[in-house]
Image (tube, coloured by chain):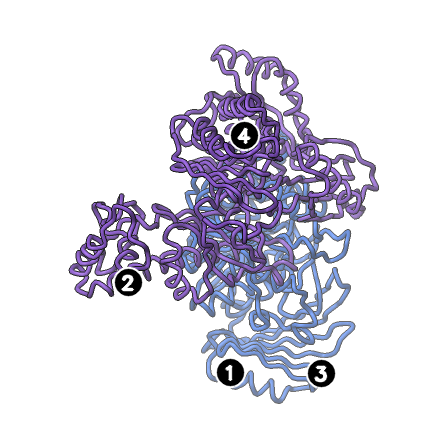
Chain colours: A blue, B purple
């Protein structure tokens, strides 16, 4: 058997790491996926190759996050490995060792935002973002599209790329009014420098394969055709599956395979998915086969019953309306941007961010300078309920001389007193921090 | 006394060991068309001056199964396959006919969809019509739950002479390889049985009662009765004998590279802290990828008689064989000619040193350099070619997938400290190997019967895989056909104890003596199984093996030839 596309698998189940013994993010999570992959003889398929993760570095983490107080206090070895696994998956594609890659690593990352006080939604650091920023360092400027197919809104990835036009983020997810983390509304469309490049498609509970593929074909693919990314990444959560214990969707292994066949991502990175016995072995196998261009028609779950999983007509109609609204919004993003931001010097965004895994509440306000010469520097004022006041400044990759100057001025002489001050300089790829 | 015999493609080597010393050796030319006669005449020659009642055991390494496979002289096999959902495989090159059953077992060994006995009747009828007497039954995840394979075998017990059950071949998960392995096992069964009976009868006629052990691809042995059940394990025992021979003649406890340099090929092996490396999944023979545990060996087309050509002003050696060296009247210059010319190798009988010089002159003219330089360049190139290959192999070996944080951060990497060599060109090539590797290089004074020594000193090996699922209350050890109930509080400690006991019992029943069995746990894990937020049980996985190695150390002072 020979794969049509060569595929690199970074399979790292971290069999000796768990958040806690009975937590969904535990040693057992990829055990049955490994059994299925091994039994199917995936390693023997010509064109499919296995790779070990590398370790991400502190610098890789700091390019994306402000870990409070520092990287070492917030991360375990497994976080360096899972983000390093994603980096490896990117490197083998960029170096043309393989056509495509799939990082089956854990723990996941898409709920990790720029500020990191702890673990939220089982995520501490955003493994895709750490990967993408490392790719940009190693391989130069890239237009990247991240398609988040996890059932939960990818609020971390949204936060990180909120104001970055070179990184299109599309998340389709179970409507935030019915599921953690509660965000992901259509109206959340990006910051002043990237308005329209953060696309949310909230879907009703009980969406089935028909609905997911409708959204893919009628919203995601047309947007990608417009955007023309250099690299497509599937932030591949598998909790839309009909057996997932913590969500309410009706997606299937066959559906996941079709999604990946149509989306045709260069890189997929495993995110959530906690039906470890009834879904993951089959969805992961389906994604592997679809990415490798192999026949997946015989992959199905033990209790698969297409009749039972048929999507009700009212849901189909609802999804069509949502799709129409989102696509219209995408087409009119330039006009909307002018209406929303013209003449506004600084765009403020106040939010409360709850860390469900660690029980921390962060009260933060982000400020984006609406700069005419670049994407504009931005800063976060943040205070967690158990912590101290923090100022975190970011200089975007395209920052103009004036923004660079202002950002460093702010770092040296903040307007008010903070205990911790950080500056993430993406122009010079440097990270500064100080305690005052 | 122990008899060790290795049958290769060109020679049969045999040794007689007494108290760890070699007391007799014989080398005979292989009679290709009659494997049994090749072995028997060699044995007779070896034993003619000794009292055969003192023989404790006879160790044979034979190519009988390998030859049948590579020469396509195997029995037709009717395959009965339950593939279930998943990857769509094409098994048509395997069986003479394939019959696919519906139904399947999942990754936890749960029967999702049961057997349809009507289908088995159809399979029986199909194979009876075709006159097929051998079958192999393989179901997906049969190592997790062998019930279906056992049931099918029960239903067909009277219809076939040979039935191979997939789960008995290996405890590893890999369905396509399980199909291939089971197919081959049935396909060579008749051939091996004939051979085995010939040996048994001939020994009986001579009044030799010593048990016969057959060398396996993993460098261990199994008794004749086990070999009849699992003849597929005898494939590729040649490289295993060579590996065991080198390990006996040049013992080490370091990471090392082992080279068996012959006329046509060089076989490469590795040691990790003196312990052999196995193929990650199993042996590959021809186009068949199997689950047969095998010493990791790679053969490259490079030897003393390889063809030398000049390409882009560079010396290229092999992969084709040139025939005899130029000095022996061969058509093309070979590395042997370079060795003869430089005086690193004795001029062989019927050889001509002047012809070796002529060979170097031919190449020297083409490269416009001196004949001394050409000869040196050839041997340096030969050494570098070997090093490039071992570097590449080591890179692959050292990046093998790992699955735990601990292994990723602290995993053992092989860093060779020495190179051990056997084979005709060893002595001549050693200084060149030493120079390109910058490592000490060793070769034994006598390697002529190394493979036979390896066979003689091999000990019975066995590996078992125990899988316990306390949520379901089941325990399986596929290699031993064990599938039984356990209590919900079964622990990893109990599983390990059980694995060690089973291994020992089984090894004794297969001809090992209790005091020589050294067993060890090679892998162990226990996973909490959780449903919702409640622990429902434990998923326990244990692998245990008889430590590979020699029966005892060879006493080096005993043997001079």
Tell me how far mark 4 sits from mark 2, CA to CA.
45 Å
The Cα–Cα distance between marks 3 and 2, rounded to whole angstroms, is 69 Å
According to the picture, the residue beneath numbered tag 2 turns out to be B377
Nearer-N-terminus badge (4/2): 4
Q: Crowdedness of circle 3 by 10 Å Cα count: few (<14), some, many (20+)?
A: few
* SS label for mark 2: helix
Mark 3 vs mark 1, CA separation in Å:
22 Å
Task: From the top left corner, tell me how far across and down residue B84 is, in percent.
Answer: 58, 29
Number of labels in the image equals 4
Please give the name of the residue rendered at 69% of the width and 55% of the height, measured from the top-left corner: A16
The residue labelled by disc 3 is A419
Picture disc at residue B231: 4
State the separation of the CA atoms marked 1 and 2.
Answer: 60 Å
Left or right relative to A32: residue B362: left
Q: Chain of mark 3?
A: A
Give the Cα distance between marks 4 and 3.
73 Å
Nearest the camera: B47 or B429? B47
User: Which residue in the structure is indicated by mark 1?
Assistant: A404
Percent x, y for residue A8?
Answer: 49, 51
Co-location on one chain, circles 1 and 2 = no
């Amino acid at each position: 058997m020979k794969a049509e596309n060569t595929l690199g698998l970074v399979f790292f189940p971290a069999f000796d790491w768990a958040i806690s013994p009975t937590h969904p993010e535990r040693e057992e999570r990829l055990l049955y996926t490994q059994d299925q992959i091994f039994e199917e003889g995936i390693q023997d398929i010509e064109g499919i190759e296995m790779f070990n993760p590398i370790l991400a570095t502190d610098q890789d983490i700091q390019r994306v996050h402000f870990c409070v107080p520092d990287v070492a206090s917030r991360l375990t070895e497994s976080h360096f490995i899972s983000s390093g696994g994603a980096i490896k998956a990117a490197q083998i594609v960029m170096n043309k060792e393989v056509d495509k890659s799939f990082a089956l690593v854990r723990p996941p990352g898409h709920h990790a935002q720029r500020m990191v006080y702890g673990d939220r939604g089982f995520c501490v650091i955003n493994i895709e973002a750490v990967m993408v920023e490392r790719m940009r360092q190693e391989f130069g400027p890239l237009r990247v599209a991240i398609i988040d197919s996890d059932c939960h809104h990818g609020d971390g990835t949204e936060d990180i790329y909120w104001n970055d036009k070179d990184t299109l983020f599309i998340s389709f997810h179970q409507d935030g009014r019915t599921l953690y983390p509660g965000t992901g509304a259509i109206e959340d469309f990006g910051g002043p420098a990237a308005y329209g490049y953060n696309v949310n498609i909230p879907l009703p509970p009980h969406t089935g394969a028909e609905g997911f593929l409708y959204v893919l074909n009628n919203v995601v693919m047309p947007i990608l055709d417009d955007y023309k990314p250099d690299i497509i990444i599937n932030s591949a959560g598998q909790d839309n599956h009909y057996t997932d214990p913590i969500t309410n969707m009706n997606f299937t292994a066959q559906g996941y395979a079709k999604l990946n066949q149509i989306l045709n991502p260069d890189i997929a990175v495993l995110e959530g998915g906690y039906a470890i016995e009834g879904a993951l072995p089959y969805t992961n196998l389906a994604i592997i086969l679809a990415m490798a261009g192999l026949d997946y028609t015989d992959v199905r779950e033990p209790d698969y019953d297409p009749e039972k999983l048929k999507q009700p007509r009212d849901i189909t109609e609802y999804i069509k309306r949502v799709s129409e609204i989102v696509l219209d919004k995408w087409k009119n993003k330039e006009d909307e941007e002018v209406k929303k931001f013209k003449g506004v010097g600084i765009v403020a965004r106040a939010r409360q961010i709850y860390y469900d895994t660690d029980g921390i509440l962060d009260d933060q306000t982000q400020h984006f300078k609406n700069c005419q010469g670049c994407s504009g520097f931005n800063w976060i004022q943040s205070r967690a309920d158990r912590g101290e006041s923090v100022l975190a400044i970011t200089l975007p990759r395209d920052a103009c001389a004036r923004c660079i100057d202002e950002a460093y001025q702010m770092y040296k002489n903040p307007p008010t007193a903070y205990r911790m001050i950080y500056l993430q300089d993406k122009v010079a790829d440097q990270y500064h921090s100080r305690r005052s | 006394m122990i008899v060790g015999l290795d049958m290769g493609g060109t020679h049969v080597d045999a040794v007689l060991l007494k108290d760890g010393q070699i007391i007799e050796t014989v080398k005979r030319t292989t009679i290709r068309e009659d494997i049994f006669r090749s072995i028997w005449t060699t044995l007779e020659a070896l034993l003619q001056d000794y009292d055969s009642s003192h023989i404790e055991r006879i160790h044979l390494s034979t190519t009988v199964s390998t030859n049948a496979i590579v020469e396509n002289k195997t029995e037709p096999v009717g395959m009965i396959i339950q593939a279930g959902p998943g990857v769509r495989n094409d098994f048509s090159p395997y069986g003479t006919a394939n019959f696919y059953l519906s139904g399947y077992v999942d990754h936890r060994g749960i029967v999702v969809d049961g057997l349809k006995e009507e289908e088995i009747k159809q399979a029986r009828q199909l194979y009876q019509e075709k006159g097929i007497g051998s079958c192999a039954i393989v179901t997906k995840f049969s190592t997790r739950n062998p019930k279906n394979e056992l049931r099918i075998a029960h239903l067909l017990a009277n219809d076939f002479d040979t039935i191979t059950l997939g789960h008995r071949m290996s405890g590893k998960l890999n369905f396509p390889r399980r199909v291939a392995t089971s197919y081959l096992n049935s396909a060579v069964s008749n051939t091996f049985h004939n051979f085995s009976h010939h040996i048994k009868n001939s020994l009986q006629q001579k009044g030799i009662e010593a048990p016969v052990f057959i060398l396996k691809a993993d460098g261990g042995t199994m008794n004749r009765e086990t070999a009849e059940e699992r003849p597929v394990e005898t494939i590729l025992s040649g490289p295993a004998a060579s590996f065991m021979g080198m390990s006996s003649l040049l013992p080490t406890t370091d990471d090392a590279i082992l080279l068996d340099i012959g006329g046509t090929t060089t076989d490469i092996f590795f040691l990790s802290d003196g312990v052999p490396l196995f193929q990650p999944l199993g042996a590959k023979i021809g186009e068949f990828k199997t689950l047969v545990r095998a010493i990791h060996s790679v053969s490259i087309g490079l030897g003393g008689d390889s063809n030398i050509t000049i390409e882009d002003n560079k010396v290229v050696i092999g992969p084709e064989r040139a025939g005899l060296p130029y000095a022996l009247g061969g058509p093309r210059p070979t590395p042997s000619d370079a060795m003869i010319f430089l005086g690193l190798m004795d001029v062989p009988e019927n050889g001509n040193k002047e012809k070796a010089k002529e060979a170097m002159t031919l190449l020297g003219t083409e490269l416009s350099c001196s004949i001394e330089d050409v000869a040196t360049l050839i041997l340096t190139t030969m050494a570098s070619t070997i090093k490039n290959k071992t570097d590449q192999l080591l890179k692959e070996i050292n990046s093998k997938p790992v699955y735990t944080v601990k292994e990723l951060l602290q995993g053992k990497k092989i860093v060779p400290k020495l190179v051990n060599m056997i084979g005709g060109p060893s002595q001549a090539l050693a200084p060149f190997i030493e120079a390109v590797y910058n490592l000490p290089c060793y070769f034994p004074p006598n390697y002529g019967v190394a493979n036979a020594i390896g066979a003689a000193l091999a000990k019975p090996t066995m590996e078992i895989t125990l899988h316990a699922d306390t949520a379901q209350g089941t325990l399986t050890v596929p290699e031993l056909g064990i599938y039984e109930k356990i209590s919900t509080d079964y622990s990893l400690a109990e599983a390990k104890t059980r694995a060690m006991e089973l291994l020992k019992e089984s090894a004794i029943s297969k001809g090992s003596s209790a005091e020589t069995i050294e067993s060890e746990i090679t892998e162990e894990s226990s996973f909490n199984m959780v449903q919702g937020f409640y622990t429902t049980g434990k998923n326990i996985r244990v692998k245990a093996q008889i430590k590979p190695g020699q029966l005892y150390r060879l006493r080096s002072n005993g043997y001079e030839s």
